[in-house]
Image: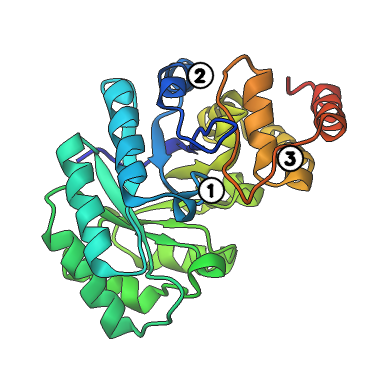
Amino acid sequence: MVPLEGVITAMLTPFDSDGRIMTKAIPDFVKYQAEKGVNGLFVCGSTGLFPLMKVEERKMIAEETIRYAKGKMFVIVQVGAPDTSTAIELAKHAEKAGADGVASVAPYYYHHGDDALKLHYKSIAESISIPLYVYNIPRYAGTSIGLGLLQQLADAGIIAGMKDSGRDFLQLVEVIQNMPDDFHVVNGTEGYILEALLAGASGMVAALGNAFPDLLVRLYRSYTKNLKEAKEMQKLINKAKSVTDKFSISSLYEVVRERNIQYGYPRAPFMKMGKVERDMMIKELKELKLI
């Protein structure tokens, strides 16, 4: 089993100006991530716009990413869906394609109790032989997966860890302190990457990794050896996020393009950035010496 640790980029999905998937953009992007020292890719997550994609499109992105990342980085494919059968279908496909593990957001739209969620995750895990991770993102899924359910799932051998994007630092710490040492917890909130690592998180899954993988790698490599440098990297990450967040997810596509990777655009209803907005953002990032 590949450990879920280090710097993991929450990978954007490339679309052309007509909203079609640009698989031809993936090889250069994967090479760029590998060269910067990224450990893994998190495919078809929220940053990857999975709710805007058909099942066959999600399979296509998983296949192409795994094809070019194999031997360079591990790949975790996010397979969550509102229904269990689709999540199982995507999980089986990810394993067949060569994924190192799968993650699943809780079934969204309808709210389900712990018993239903336990059965949902158990059904996914029993369909595959690669690790399954919980992807906790309550602001989108509508359900927060707490310590009690995580303990039940881990004790039953259903899950191997969690990507936490709950934006609740105290809950994250509670999980880290109360789960077994071999239960991997990676932090999905960029505002406190360093603090999460110091609390015991095994790594990070970050949307900013698309645009600034080198910055995240520097933080990860320095936090145990040079805390002062790591603090400076966290400050820079927060400044970069404050700039890119003004323009939604569209901004990350533009920063990637500014770094000479032709990676398309987001899919509608997300809008492309206008020239004035783009120039303003790039100017701010250059002032921070990030590009």
Q: Is residue 109 above or below residue 24?
A: below
Q: Element type at marker 2?
A: loop
Relative to 267, does residue 126 appear above or below in the rendering?
A: below
Q: Nearer the viewer, residue 16 or 94?
A: 16
Mark in front: 3 vs 2: 3
**Mark before the other along the chain sequence, 3 or 2:** 2
Q: Identity of the amino acid at label 1? A: Leu
Mark 1 or mark 2: which comes first in sequence? 2
The residue labelled by disc 2 is 36
Q: Which residue type does callout 3 highlight?
A: Thr
Q: Which amino acid, by three-letter code, is at mark 2? A: Lys
Spatial CA distance of label 3 from label 2 is 20 Å
- Give me the disc on residue 244: 3
Q: With respect to residue 92, does 221 lie above or below? A: above
Q: Position of residue 210 (x, y in %)?
A: 56, 31
Work out whether residue 257 or residue 104 is closer to the camera in this orientation and state it.
257
Distance CA(mark 1)–CA(mark 2): 23 Å
> Mark 1 or 3, which is nearer the eye?
3
Q: Residue at x 43, y 24 (%)?
A: 26
Q: Which mark is residue 179?
A: none
Q: Which residue is nearer to you in this view: 282 or 159?
A: 282
Front residue of this view, candidates 48 and 200: 48
What secondary structure is found at the residue carrying circle 1? helix
Residue 42: image x %, image y %?
41, 41
Location of mark 1 (residue):
198
